Image (spheres, rainbow, N blue to C red):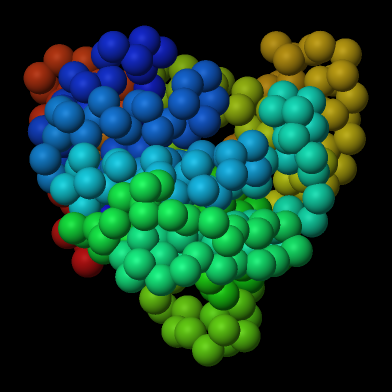
Amino acid sequence: MRVIYHLNSRDVRAVPSEAAWAESMGYDGVSANETAHDPFLALTLAATATSRVTLETHVAIAFPRSPMVVAYTARDLQDLSGGRFRLGLGTQVKGHIERRFSTEWRAPGPRLREYIRSLRQIWDSWDSGNRLNFSGDHYNFSLMTPFFSPGPGTHPHPPIFNAAVNAYNCRVAGEVSDGLVLHTFTSADYVRQVVRPNIAAGAMKAGRNSADVTISGGGFIVTGPNRQAINEAKLDARRRIAFYASTRTYLPVLECHGFQEICPRLHQMSLEGRWDEMGDLITDDILGAFAVVGEYDEIAPAILERYGGLVDEIGLTVAVRGNAEQGQLKSIIQAIQDSN
């Protein structure tokens, strides 16, 4: 199982040293998401400081960007990194698309499928020199003169992953993507009951083998060197679980475990601005469903017990202090990787 590190730096100037550190720890990949910074810029900086790890948007929000814009950026990052870039795309939810990005919201699943197909046609046009001619319900591309084409690439096209929570976008991944990025707010039961069957359905529709679709991610991981650290990490995990559980988009994940009644309560608390209190509603049962918990010497077996055979990659980002804890982190990463 591959192990992915998520960049945490609030200051983009710290990204190169953080990425280099992650590579030295033995991680297989470094990812960046679209929260307070542009993920493509962070990975550009990471590319200059690493030589082995894959560099992944985990994820970039698709719809505020034209597929043509993303095609250029992804191609440049693939060239800069020596073929190590991986493009992860997500739809976000309606409120963010309309009110944070001021972009039109329409048919996100079909639009995402078309987005991915158009990216590949743009790249194929550059490689072959053939006329670009993509026509769909959401995107149309028919102009690409030699002046604007970077020409054939020196590396394969970047793999495309799409994020998915609902069943439809899982089918999109099975149909057109190289992989699926799980949301952190997920569980092994949800992967087993919803994610994998729908990847298989999408793959069957497209005449593909579902085993060729990589599944990346797998819930919250709560770990530390001792019980005190674990208890502190649990508080943070409860707050984050409450945040996601307050959003009705994630209701199917709660329904998988019979926890759906907590969603309207948390949603109302969020409208009232009671963010600090919301974590109190996350019981031990809810925490246990969405988080793998254990001290450093316990966490690798716990992760493998829950997600072994279900996912191909796991996200593991741990704030370690001192050489001793860094040594423990290396051992955790190696133990997960050796499970293959």
Front-lying residue, 294 or 179: 179
Quarter residue 64 falls in: top right
Residue 135 placement, left or right of 294 = right
Report the residue at 81% width, 11% height from top. Answer: 273
User: From this viewpoint, is residue 243 visible?
Assistant: yes
Report the residue at 31% width, 65% height from top. Answer: 127
Question: Which quadrant of the rendered structure holds the C terminus?
Answer: bottom left
User: From this viewpoint, is residue 308 visible?
Assistant: no
Residue 328 placement, left or right of 166 = left
**Numbered label tally:** 0
Question: Which quadrant of the rendered structure holds the N terminus?
Answer: bottom left
Front-lying residue, 300 or 156: 156
- The percent position of residue 187, horizontal first and vertical second, equals 57, 53
Quarter residue 330 falls in: top left
Quarter residue 136 falls in: bottom right
Report the residue at 50% width, 65% height from top. Answer: 132
- The percent position of residue 195, horizontal first and vertical second, equals 59, 65
Report the residue at 56% width, 68% height from top. Answer: 133
- The percent position of residue 257, horizontal first and vertical second, equals 71, 55
Residue 201 placement, left or right of 247 = left
Instruction: Please tell me whether residue 185 is drawn above or below residue 49 in the rendered image.
Output: below
Instruction: Please tell me whether residue 64 is drawn above or below residue 313 in the rendered image.
Output: above
- The percent position of residue 131, horizontal first and vertical second, equals 47, 69
